[in-house]
Structures are given as C-alpha cells and as structure tokens.
Image: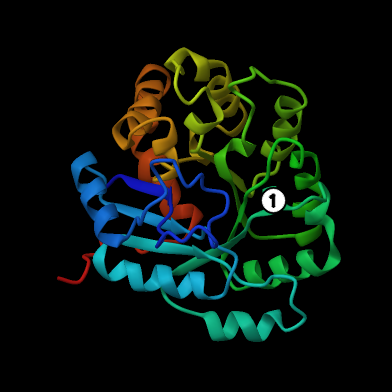
Amino acid sequence: MKIDAHHHLWRYQPTEYAWIDPESRIARDFMGKDLATTLEAAGVGGAIAVQARQVPEETRFLIDAARSAPILGILGWIDLRSPAIEALLEADAHPLIVGYRHVVQDEVDDNFLLSQEFIRGVRAAVARGLTYDLLVNHRQLSSVVAFIESVGNGRFVLDHAAKPDIAGRGWSPWAEDIAGVAALPNVLCKVSGLVTEADHVGWKSDDFERYLDHIFGLFGPERLIWGSDWPVCLLAADYGETLSLIEDYIDRHCPAERAAILGGNAIRAYALPLTERTPDP
C-alpha cells in the first residue's frame, strides 16, 4: 500500500490561514472527501494528516476528517511549551494520533528548538511512543542536532528535507547542516514539499536531482519517507506530478526500495497499524 505521509486539510478562513494568498488556488476548503478522491485517483491507499493550525482544535478537526478519508494517523498540534504538558497529552490521547508538530519555521528565533520548555514538552511526547515532526527552514537547521540530542531517545522526522532553496539553487549551509542531522540514527527524512521550494511555474525534474542525490545519499532509502504536501503542492504541481517526481527518481536509483519509501518507512516511523483503514460510508 502506498502511503502519503504528509498532507493537510482545512476549512479555509483568511484570518486562520494568513500564510495562504487569498488569490491562490489553495484558498478554498480541502476536506476529507477531497482527500479521499485525490488518493483514489493516484492509487494511494492511506495518508498521514498533518496539522496546519496551531490551535488545540486542529487535532480534533483532523480526527473528525478521518471519518471520510483513509487517514491512518494524525500529526496534531499541542502546546508543547505548557508546564502542564503531561496532562495535555493525556487528555489529547486518541488511537489516530501518532505524533505532533510545531510550525518552527514561523518562529523568529532561529534557536527556538533549544528552549528548555520546548525540549521538555517534546521529551514528554516521545516518551509516550509518539513521533515528533520537525518543520524547520534551512536557517534553523543548524540547531536540530543539539535539539534532538537534548530530547534524547525518540522518533523524529525531518519535514520537507528542511526546505532547501531549490529555486535559488542554494546549497550551503543546508547541505552540511542536513548531513549532521542525518548522522543521528533516530531521524527519518520526508521527501516532501520540494516542488514548492522550486520555481512554481518553470520547474523541471532536473532541478531536484542534486538535492535528491544528497538526501538519498545521507539518509539511505531505509530512512526516507514520501509525502505529497497536498494541497500546498498545488501551488507548483498537481498531485500526480508530485508523486511521479519521486517515483521516477526511485525507479532510476533504487527501485528495490520503492515499497519502503512509498509506504513501509512511514509505517515504521509512525508505528502505524499494518491494516488498511476504511472511511465511514
């Protein structure tokens, strides 16, 4: 089964999604039934829903959406800096919640990850067997190793390969910093969200080759996970193009690892049940 390990859903409101250009094609509702239709058309059997708002209601919104889509797990949002984090995690517990994410890329402090309150909260989450997804930009990447070493044992997933500047052909220090993260054995990396780091209108598959070579070489196929970043990817490519970009690379470089990158590694990273989930009729 192919698993899309990174997608979003929302009921669009300009005030709640200020990062979305109100004139863009994603400035509308994207709900569970939309996801189900998209996955079926692409031959993808299940997905991981990822938070897009930093409010407690976001996680419950995604749980409700799972009634109409084959959502296998949810990366929700919780106030990881709260002094009452243990009680919050207990109250938030649900079989579909496989981990949490904070939108660190929007924090003005490039060392946000290193605050003791945040480290304590993430440590509490991973101690419960949950996964923490890291959403950082290439400027914040340099603090990831110290953050993970401070948290200690746990499963971590680096979203969007830390967003290299593909459109600007940026390389250093992203290339060196992500190598340091890849040296940590408990970190997996999502090959997701790359099309929106490229030229939205004029990108070519060759634009990604150098970056994919680096990512695949560092993490190895056993620690890479595919995700579409739908519907954000629609700013630069349709769902099928986003999937084909990675499938084509896999077929040329490591075809024997296709099933792992397109599903198996996500099962391991998020401790997913090994059965398909059927939405409510």
Q: Nearer the viewer, residue 277 or 256?
A: 277
Give neighbour class at mark 1: few <14, some 14-19, many 20+ (Cα, 10 Å). Answer: few
Q: Tell me the residue at 37%/53% (across/down).
A: 28
Which color scheme is applied? rainbow
Q: Amino acid at mark 1?
A: Asp
Q: Pinpoint residue 49: horizontal percent, then vertical percent.
A: 42, 58
* Quadrant in which the C terminus appears: bottom left
> Is residue 81 in view?
yes
**Element on which disc 1 rests:** helix
Q: Is residue 251 above or below residue 17?
A: above
**Residue 53 shown left or right of residue 102 in the figure:** left
Q: Nearer the viewer, residue 187 or 78?
A: 78
**Residue 58 shown left or right of residue 238 in the figure:** right
Q: Tell me the residue at 42%/19% (across/down).
A: 253
**Which of the 4 quarters of the picture holds residue 47?**
bottom left
Residue corresponding to mark 1: 106
Q: Tell me the residue at 58%/24% (across/down).
A: 217
Q: Is residue 261 above or below residue 87?
A: above
Q: Pinpoint residue 30: horizontal percent, then vertical percent.
A: 34, 55
Q: Tell me the residue at 30%/44% (across/down).
A: 2
**Which of the 4 quarters of the picture holds residue 80?**
bottom right
